[in-house]
Amino acid sequence: MPMTKDLRYRKAFWLALGMAFLIFLPFIIYDGGYFIYYGDFNVQQIPFYKLAHESVRSGNVFWSFYTDLGANFIGSYSFYLLFSPFFWLTLPFPTSWLPFLMAPLLMLKTACAALTAYLYLERFVRDRDFALLGSILYAFSGWMFFNIFFNHFHDVAVFFPLLLLGVEKLVTEHKRGFFTLMVALNAMVNYWFFVGEVVFVVLYVFVRMTDKDWGMTLKTFCRLALEAVMGVGLVAAVLLPSVLALLGNPRTGVDDLLTGWNFWIYWQDQNREAILQSIFFPPEWPARLNFFPDSGGAWSSRSAWLPLVGASGALAYCFSRKNDWLKKMLGISLLMALVPGLNSLFILLNHSYYARWFYMPILLMALATARALEESAADNSYMMRGLKWSLIISVTFIVMCGLTPQVKDGKLVFGLESNPKMLWIYAVIVLTCLLYMTLLISRLRGHQKFKKLLLGGVCVVCLSFGVFYLANGKNGRTQSQFIINNAINGREVISLPDDGVSFSRIDFYDSLDNMGMYWHRPTIQAFHSIVPPSIMEFYPTVGVKRDVGSRPEADYFALRPLLSVRWLFIESGKENQNPMPGYTFHSEQLGYNVYENQHFLPMGFAYSEYILRDQLEDISEKQRSNVMLRYLVLEDEEAAARYSDIMSQGEPTFPIDASYDAMANDAADRREMCCYDFTHDNRGFTARSNLQQDTLMFFSVPYDAGWTATVNGNPVRIEKVNVGFMGVRVPAGEAVIRFEYFTPGLREGLWISGGFLVLFGLYLWWCRKEARETSRALDIQRSLFLGEAVHLTWEEYLKQYRNKGSRQDALQKALEQAGLTQEEFHFTPEDSPPETAEHPSDRPSS
């Protein structure tokens, strides 16, 4: 008995879940219940989940003191995980469980990706077993394996098929509201990927419209646009704070746009070839490029491989079609991937190369493959042409990358790849898959075991390659144990005295990124792409590179007291144990030598002199942090005028004295004008001072529009000082300084979302009313269809109804064409149709 639709979509979910479980299980056992991978997974994905989980559960959802020097929590984590339903699923569990949940979450995401892909694919095939096959190809594609490294990318792959499904339902079934919800869901899960999805969906709609049988009308197109706008409006509370958090970030500025010849030609010599290779071969590991080692694109998610079938199904489908919308979409997607400027449309024309949008055409490749394999049951030549060309192209890449001669170190060698062993392993994988597919298509097409052997082959390749890929991507046992013992569990082991100091930052020499985040301690060493623009402004000003991470070098010793760094950690096994001047050994903990900064300055200290930003520009970058410890930097003359009564303008003497002794003296001067207490909470921080004179108090907390401040209960102006931080005027004597933070755009976004929610409710009410009218009109048409004098077809009547806009007008027009009056027909719109009438939905569709 054929399997029902329901059992198939359930099978897609459970089959994918079971396969993912088998892939991850050996590594979970190996790591004692954890899943430790490598690179960004270890230093971003795990600590980000832990930090966000603890923040949400504790209500600390506005400002994070544990993200770099401090960050807008919503703005920094909405890209990574904050509004993902998968993250929400973790909230009932204790934070200590999060590292154990990383692998189960990846399994669940894989299963959900198979489920949503099936719901989209099954609309386009007659035999839904091939939709099941396509869903597995999508869920275990090369893109999905590659992005285990960035596991939050899986979230967008899960929900994207529902976006295309919403388009199809609205156009072909006139399903109201579903597309709106899918737009809202995808925009909420990840706003940055949503930009690329908008580009792809717009292309999809216009290309799909070339199919005359699709049923797109002007009215439906307008409804589609309206629902898209409503979907975006519904999640304004998510989008607006996220967008505002990005404004001013240099990675999104004009200087970062793709321009000139780079718009048309990839500046990496081998990138086009690498893009094509990624379609026919399994994914390489992030940062370990092999076939084309000089192509760039490490960490770019460049992979479009489908397990077992590769590109053969998509090629077979395209070869057999002339004027087909799916063929056009695949062709346009390939063109956009090969042209830098078109590729960059998916990332707002950013100059960095990313292929993180490939999951979108991969879904269509899975569809083309499913349809090609379905057709091959009747004609094996259908797939054989695709397999032949896949073999030719694959062998070409193998010969080109593996057998081309070159001279290295004065010796003639063969091969252009960086790792010959891995290239030939990949060659064996691809050629074996093509051989299996060829034998299966040529000898067993039409056989009752054909579909089982096909699905079984896909499952075997997914499982075997998945284990192989993860095994080669993982670090060794020693590294896994270091992350488990020192990073994940280190928070409970590290013990540092506070000595009445409630806040200080820690520092590391060449250690694991985001160790401070693991330990839940403020730190100046951070690996995080989305932080306040003021941080991105400050670090380059003082000569420290700031792209995706903050990693100030040790020779910036004056920067440490400026940023309230008290503790320095150096792995005890490192030969170089030379801390910066002014540090003394404290203890050894968790394999680290811990040093204390003797020139530590508590958070919140004041100056007696200032200089202007223009004066700072005249000083070399390397010495600016030294100068900032001596003088407070104000932005302009207007700011200086506001504080001229309490501070005098300084004149730095050249050459600048950037010696250790000068730094020690400046730090001592600042210590005389410090706050004696500083504590932070879920809404901001409170500081207390008791100084001899009015002053401008400096806090090394990034300047952000969401901050407001009071001193002794009175609102005060927050001044931008020291190129990216905050300062407030504080009177002499006892003073209580209170800063509170509320996410910029959140309040306005909530109002906008609320307004669109009301609009969406009204829209659904109107659609329901319209649906009742449509239902009544269908009953009328059903009755009219029984009359021998009426020769209108089902499609023509619906067209008249849509064009006229009301059942009464449509009825009148139908009767006119039939040459009848309503009285002659003895039927009114209020009459009930005959019970024996055939319902139009029971008739076969065109």
Image (cartoon, grey):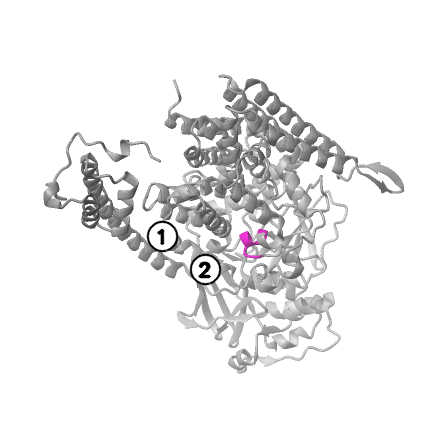
Q: Quadrant of residue 553?
A: bottom right
Say the numbered circle drawn on residue 684. 2
On-image quarter of the N terminus: top left
Above or below — where is 778 with respect to 601? above
Please tell me how many numbered marks the rendered image carries. 2
Our reading of the magenta stretch's main secondary structure is helix
Describe the element under mark 2 as helix, strand or loop: strand
- Front residue of 283 and 44: 283
* Residue closest to the eye, 681 or 149: 149
Q: Residue at x 49, y 48 (%)?
A: 200
Q: Residue 35: x percent and y percent?
A: 57, 34
Q: Residue furthest right?
A: 410
Looking at the image, is 288 positioned above or below residue 77?
above
Tell me how far mark 1 sits from mark 2, CA to CA. Answer: 52 Å
- Residue 29 visible in image: no
Residue 610 visible in image: yes
Label 1's element?
Answer: helix
User: Which three-letter amino acid code belongs to the residue tagged 1?
Assistant: Leu
Task: Pick whichever of labels 1 and 2 is earlier in the sequence.
Answer: 1
Residue 265, image x and y in percent?
67, 54
Residue 506: assigned label: none
Along the viewing direction, whichever of 301 and 229 lies nearer the viewer: 229
Q: Which residues are magenta?
A: 343-349
Q: Is residue 575 left or right of residue 832?
A: right
Judge whether 111 appears above or below 190 on screen. above
Q: Amino acid at mark 2?
A: Gly
Identify the residue at horizontal 66%, vertical 71% (top origin): 627
Q: Which residue is mark 1?
A: 218
Instruction: Say which quadrant the C terminus sits in.
Output: top left
